[in-house]
Image: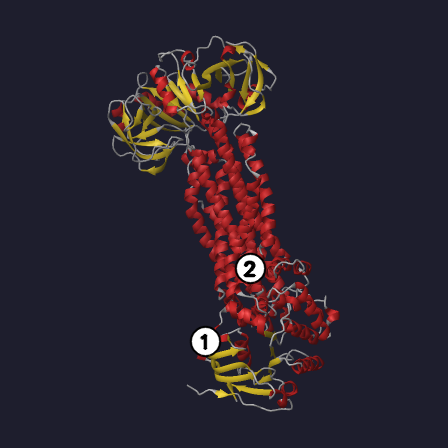
Amino acid sequence: MTPAREGALTADARGARSSLASLTMIDVVDVSRRYEGDQAALDHLSLHVAEGECLALLGPSGSGKSTLLNLIAGLDRPTEGTVTVGGTRVDRLGEAAAARYRRATIGLVFQFFNLLDDLTVTDNVLLPAQIAGRPAGDARRRARELLGTLGIDRHADAYPGRLSGGERQRVAVARALMNRPPLLLADEPTGALDTASGAEVRKLLIDLHADGQTIILVTHDEVLASAVATRTVRLVDGQAA
Amino acid sequence: MSAIRTVVRGAQRRRVSTIVIIAATAMAVTATVLAGLLLAASSRPFANAFAAQHGAHLTAFFDAAKTTERQAAATAAQAGQSAGPFPVAMVATRLDGMPPGGPGLPPLQVAGRADPGGDAVDRVTLLTGHWPRAADEIVIARTNLRLPAGTTLKLANGSTLKVVGEARSISRSAGGWMTPGGVTALGATGWQMLYRYADAGTEAAMTAHATALGPDARTQSWIGVRNDAAHRTQLFVPLLSAFGLIGLALAALVIGNVTAGTIASATRRIGVMKALGLTPSQVVRACLVQALIPGGIGAILGIVAGDLLAVPLTADVADLFGTVPMSVTPWVDAAAIVAAVLVIAATAAPAAWRAARLRTVDALAVGRTPRGGRGRFAARLAARSGLPRPLSLGLAQPFTRPARLLVMLLTIGLGTAAATFAIGLAGSLRAIQAADQKPATSADVVVLSGPDTEVADPRTVLDGVPGTGSYYGRGPAEIIVDGLREAAQGTVTVGDARAAGYEMLEGRWYAEPGEAVVTTGFLTATGKHIGDTVTGTGHGPLTLVGETFDGSANNHLYTDAASVPDLAAPFEWYVKLKPGTDLAVYLAALKDKHIPAEATQVEGADGTLIILDSLTALLTALLVSVAALGVLNAVVLDSRDRVHDIGVHKSVGMTPKQTALMVIASIGIPGLAGGAAGVPAGYVLHHWAVPAMARGAGIRLPHSTIEVYAPALLAALALAGLILAAAGALLPAGWAARTRTAVALRTE
């Protein structure tokens, strides 16, 4: 058994802010995830993230970044180890409980946006609240507020296919924030964007973190990580380097 | 070719989809085989069976007292082909265990034949059991009176015959068959000869052939048998044709949808292969091969299942038509395979062409909502409906693929139409039987009278027996009417016979002597109309004041006994008891006064009704299953297509239950709309087919036998479309609910 290793910390310009955070939000302990053929995507990894922190997970393709994100989001289960988020043992949740956990706790932003093309921007943003059964009036107010804050309110009735990549990613962020999740998980949020759109999204994440949003960011982009994250963890072959 | 194999293999790895495709195709091909058989069996059933059995154009009976066996055999020279002479005997039997004085079975004309099919003419088809081997064994001709193998018949002399099988002769040459030695032992009364002629097409030719046999020959022409059979076959052809056509349409729809879906499911793989250099023509070939492999497996399984199911089906159809079961028909199998391949190819070709022209980038973006903006209006409307979001998402979803929605609508619609039609048909048949039995069921007691009974006119006694309510008398009569070649079957009544509850089609029941009510058959035979007067012998002019329903389509006339003054009909008196009267006490009271009486009895469902019931149940179950599998296939395809979107929904917190609800809701609109469209379609089909069946049989049906659908039943049937669709969606809903989010999201 390989001993668990704490993810290496890399202090950056925003390190001071993370030190303000005292409560542990995410506790990943000795987690492994193996797929068919016993290939380990994660290998006895341990990681702790404090509330209000913005952690960047860096590493080459296949290093286990997205797998870790999936485990924290309750989209997948570890083969070994425990994942606790906000006091909830995510690795023990069944499908229904995991869905409820995601509604309440997680906002997900994907590289390719994952917007539903047959729904308008507003309807995409409303989706998490509607699935959670939140009152329609409150949900609409929240959606308007988010679209306004993110500068895409003029596209409220448009369909995602007509928007630029940067605008689509803003819609995806708005959807992720709809239920006011304590934790925002972003998987390569600028990976599919051109430089200008990438910069837009980078600024958006900086602003969100400045407002106290806990964020875990998976990226290849060192510039994005250094601009946004308070801490970075580099993964190589499923382990913290 | 290896690139094509890669595309095909990829599609086959999707086990659920492949199994569903094979099952749906198999079921559809089974329906095609059975529908084809129904249509084939309904096309000239008598002629086909007559040809298959080498039926006898003329059946002759020679009395042994006047004609020797050798003389009978000598008549063979007059025909092209012949069989016989076979010894013939008339036997009176009763079922073993019945008391000697009790009712017997109808007398049987038994022919002695060594085997059923060895003769050149009238090759009898053995339906069950085996041909008689011993002198005390008998095979019975299958009629409405069913005497299964194992039944023991008792003869008047105390000896017994054992029924060892049932058989059918399309020529109706005998009521039963025994070994020649067995018939001789019974006491043969004559000889049977069977003939086939080169010229047997006209009544005149047959009359000439019969005359040529001499005055001692009693003959039966095939034309009479054919006309009688035609009456029966015409009754059921519309019914079976309707089922056959629905089956073919449903099968074509399901196979087409399955094929299109199979190709659509390989789009991403095709995209990858195109990116690696697969040419459009290779794409087309790959698509065709991919569609034909599961389609071909399904078709073969469907043929096997169809041939297996054909055995009970064709037996039922043969019983309905009074013909012999069709054997497994290779040309129907071949036609079903060709039809299936054609439908697969016709559907696959455009789908393959589309796939070949699809931009590689679009092909790679599988798993998402179809592009092109279809269904957005529905999505917007659903989003504002205020319904729970999983429900509204599901309801809007089919509109993104209008063609698939249309196919699903038609599939559910046809399934619902089949169920509506079948239920209506069963209701009509029961109503027809009830209407037919009403004269018997409308009274509580029937009292017999006549020369053999001690009290010639029971009316004198009935009035004095406590509990007697109303009563009327009814007796048979042959009434000679000018313009009719033969006397009409008549029923004369005494008292108020309206209590019998005869169903009126037109006009009213007669109110006085000199008026008559007739059946449709009578009006057809005489060319008369209600309001006309008929004349004849033994009665004065009779004014036809009403037309009544008679399920037997006989040429029948009802009138007051006083209209036929010279008639001395043996009457039966139908008594309706006063409320609260004990039937047993009443019958005992009549017995004390030497009045023979018994409680009226409702006849059980007759054999035809039972066959029709089982036939419609089989066909309906098959068609509904095909429809459900069609829905299952469509929803599986849809769920596969949208697996990425399902992943997105789950990533934002949709629970497995909500996911299942969304998938099931996706068939809500096609289910409701298909049900709503299928019910009127089935209703219209029923209202066309049932009167058409009746017209074929030469009868008109009362309103009550057609209007068998209660509003609540129609509403339930409309909802049945939804239930059918939901049943088809359950499996893919479960699959969607179980799909792991991370896996679903990787589908890009």
> In the image shown, does A192 or B659 lie closer to the viewer?
B659
Query: Against B409, is B708 above or below?
Result: above
Q: Give the chain letter at badge 2.
A: B
* Residue B295 x %, y %: 50, 57
The secondary element bearing badge 1 is classed as helix
Q: CA distance from mark 1 to mark 2?
A: 31 Å
In the image, taking residue B509 as reference, residue B150 lies left or right, namely left
Q: Determine the residue positioned at 42% across, 23% down.
A: B581
Q: Give the foreground label among 1 and 2.
A: 2
Q: Amino acid at mark 2?
A: Leu
Residue B258's tag is none
What residue would you read off at disc 1?
A: A36
Q: Give the chain letter at badge 1.
A: A
Residue B661's tag is 2
Q: Determine the residue positioned at 62% across, 76% down.
A: A111
Crowding near pointer 2: few (<14 within 10 Å), some, many (20+)? Answer: many
**Quadrant housing residue B153:** top left
* Residue A134 x %, y %: 62, 65
Q: Amino acid at mark 1?
A: Glu
